Image (spheres, rainbow, N blue to C red):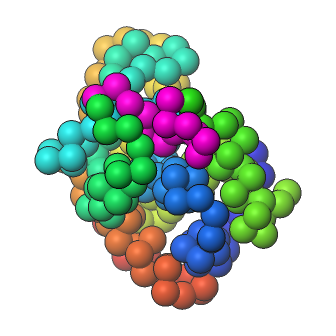
């Protein structure tokens, strides 16, 4: 999947921060950066999946998943969700990131990619490529690869491990995602890459 190099992330974040498109689409791209989740997960998310008081997203199973994936939400993601809620249906089963045309319809599969193109990243970044950018950034922060994989919901490579190892590593993932979101905040003010501190 096409994605920008990590040393270009500052420029991308600046472009996203300045993007003048629909706020729901812009928020969906930010949510990908804040969580590392797939576009499909974000498009299908409903309000009852989120506990804003506890700062977690209980993402429903997707693809071959059999269990809910609990994701820590940094304060920046909570603020984002609170800011868009008035633009959506607000019932438990209403979409968090609906179509810009109707709160009762899923956001288009192409919406986030089109926004990234309009930001000036045609052929240089696709929506799914943001998962790779987030993965790279979390590893650059110094967190162990298995913690990053737990956050992104990657399958365990060994079938035996997949069957028996159900560790969530939630405490360290809370620290990791808050540190990552703080780093993204710093990038908003600068188009240059900022050295990351080790975990």
Magenta stretch: residue 101 in it? yes
Foreground residue, 172 or 25? Answer: 25
Q: Residue furthest front?
A: 102
All told, the count of numbered labels is: 0
Q: Quadrant of the C terminus?
A: bottom left
Instruction: Please determine whether, in this image, residue 87 is positioned above or below residue 90.
Output: below
**Percent position (x, y) of residue 42?**
49, 39
Q: Is residue 75 left or right of residue 134?
A: left
Magenta-colored span: 92-104
Foreground residue, 10 or 24? Answer: 24
Q: Quadrant of the N terminus?
A: top right
Image quarter for residue 178?
Answer: bottom left
Foreground residue, 13 or 140? Answer: 13
Q: Residue furthest left?
A: 53
Q: Is residue 168 left or right of residue 136?
A: left
Is the stretch drawn in magenta largely helix, strand or loop? loop
Foreground residue, 121 or 157? Answer: 121
Residue 37 seen by the camera: yes
What's the residue at 21%, 40% (across, down)? 51
């Amino acid at each position: 999947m096409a994605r920008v190099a990590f040393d270009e992330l500052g420029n991308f974040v600046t472009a996203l921060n300045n993007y003048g498109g629909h706020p729901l689409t812009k928020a969906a791209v930010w949510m990908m950066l804040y969580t590392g989740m797939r576009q499909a997960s974000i498009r299908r998310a409903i309000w009852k999946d989120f506990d804003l008081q506890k700062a977690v997203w209980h993402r429903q199973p997707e693809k071959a998943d059999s269990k809910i994936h609990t994701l820590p939400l940094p304060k920046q993601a909570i603020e984002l969700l609170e800011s868009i809620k008035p633009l959506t249906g607000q019932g438990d089963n209403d979409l968090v990131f609906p179509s810009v045309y109707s709160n009762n319809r899923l956001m288009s599969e192409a919406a986030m990619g089109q926004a990234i193109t309009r930001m000036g990243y045609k052929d240089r970044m696709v929506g799914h490529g943001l998962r790779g950018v987030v993965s790279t950034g979390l590893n650059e922060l110094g967190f162990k690869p298995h913690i990053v994989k737990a956050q992104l919901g990657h399958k365990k490579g060994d079938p035996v491990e997949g069957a028996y190892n159900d560790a969530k590593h939630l405490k360290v993932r809370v620290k990791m995602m808050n540190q990552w979101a703080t780093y993204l905040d710093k990038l908003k003010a600068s188009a240059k890459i900022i050295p990351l501190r080790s975990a």
